[in-house]
């Protein structure tokens, strides 16, 4: 059974570090070894409450995926580190994680939710548009590759 939980315990943090490492290594053209090490070492920052959040998806207690929420502007949050391990894909876990982040962003009072994804990540783009995200111009410098940007209005 799928459970999406706040990353609280050291065991959770170990699992989420592994998931985020797998996520960035899967897109190694986008990250240097140094940037991965710095990102992992800084966790749970910059995804800390009250405005941020870091979640792990567990399928029958096994770490299957993760997602994070980061504040970027007053009233605007950004979906970060959305990842599902390959062996857990096509089970609705990414959709459940995305819906969880959307609900948490609303609870935190955000009116907009943004994200960036690589152009090569077509299934991710399809998921985001099915949830109501719409393409927008780049809202931050493009750090690597062909990044596409999306935004969801949470005013509904």
Image (cartoon, rainbow, N blue to C red):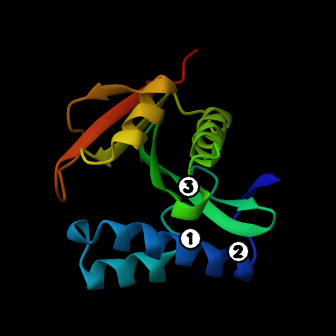
C-alpha span from label 3 to label 2: 13 Å
Label located before the other in sequence (3 or 1): 1
Quarter location, residue 74: top left
Mark 1 — residue? 44
Give the residue at x 30% y 78%. 35
Q: Where's the C terminus, which quadrant? A: top right
Decide if residue 73 is in sight here.
Answer: no
Does residue 64 appear to the left or right of 62 in the view shown? left
Instruction: Describe residue 125's horizontal placement relative to residue 85 as left or right.
Output: left
Between marks 1 and 2 in the image, the one whose residue lies nearer the viewer: 2
Q: Are marks 1 and 2 in contact (CB under 8 Å)?
A: no
Q: Earlier in the sequence, mark 1 or mark 2?
A: 2
For disc 2, the neighbor class at 10 Å (few under 14, some 14 to 19, many from 20) is some
Camera-near label (3 vs 1) is: 3
| Badge 3 element | strand
Residue at mark 2 = 12
* Image position, residue 75 (x, y; %): 48, 34
- Whole-angstrom CA distance, mark 3 to mark 1, is 12 Å
Which one is in front, 141 or 128?
128
């Amino acid at each position: 059974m799928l459970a999406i939980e706040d990353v609280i315990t050291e065991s959770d943090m170990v699992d989420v570090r592994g998931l985020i490492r797998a996520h960035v290594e899967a897109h190694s053209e986008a990250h240097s070894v140094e940037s991965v090490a710095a990102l992992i070492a800084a966790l749970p920052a910059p995804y800390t409450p009250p405005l941020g959040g870091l979640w792990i998806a567990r399928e029958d207690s096994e770490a299957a995926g993760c997602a994070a929420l980061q504040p970027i502007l007053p009233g605007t949050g950004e979906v970060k580190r959305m990842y599902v391990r390959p062996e857990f894909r096509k089970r609705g876990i990414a959709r459940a994680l995305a819906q969880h982040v959307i609900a948490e962003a609303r609870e935190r009072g955000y009116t907009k939710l943004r994200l960036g994804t690589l152009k090569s990540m077509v299934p991710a783009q399809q998921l985001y548009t099915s949830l109501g995200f719409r393409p927008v111009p780049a809202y931050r410098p493009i750090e690597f590759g062909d990044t596409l940007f999306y935004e969801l209005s949470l005013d509904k």
